[in-house]
Amino acid sequence: MGKPAIRSLIIDLNGTIWRGNAVLPFAHEFLSFISARELDYIFVTNDSTTSPEHCINRLKHLGHDIP
């Protein structure tokens, strides 16, 4: 029996996609990678000072369309 294929991801935004106000290296490439492979994913954060709208706008600025 082989390992199960990864079908879904839970992605923490702060520290994975950005840190503070800076986008982390390869964040755009990573988001393109998971989108091209049609993986299911959700974004999460424990940053209570950032609104969901702010996170969506930052992701859109990276060129990532949020459904």
Image (spheres, rainbow, N blue to C red):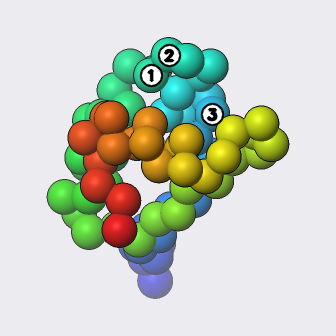
Question: Which element carries disc 1, helix, strand or loop?
Answer: strand
Question: Which element carries disc 2, helix, strand or loop?
Answer: strand
Residue at numbered disc 3? 14
Q: Residue at x 59, y 22 (%)?
A: 19
Cα separation, mark 1 vs mark 3, equals 9 Å
Q: Residue at x 25, y 41 (%)?
A: 63
Q: Which is more toward the observer, 36 or 65?
A: 65
> Residue 8: horizontal and vertical position, in percent?
47, 70
- Above/below status of 38 relative to 21: below
Circles 1 and 2 in contact, beta carbons < 8 Å: yes
Q: Give left or right: position of 23 versus 39.
A: right
Locate residue 14: give its quadrant. Answer: top right
> Residue 31: horizontal and vertical position, in percent?
33, 45
> Residue 58: horizontal and vertical position, in percent?
44, 36
Q: Report whether residue 11 is seen.
A: no
Residue at numbered disc 1? 23
- The mark nearer the N terminus, 2 or 3, is 3
> Residue 22: horizontal and vertical position, in percent?
50, 16
Q: What type is the residue that disc 1 sits on? A: Val
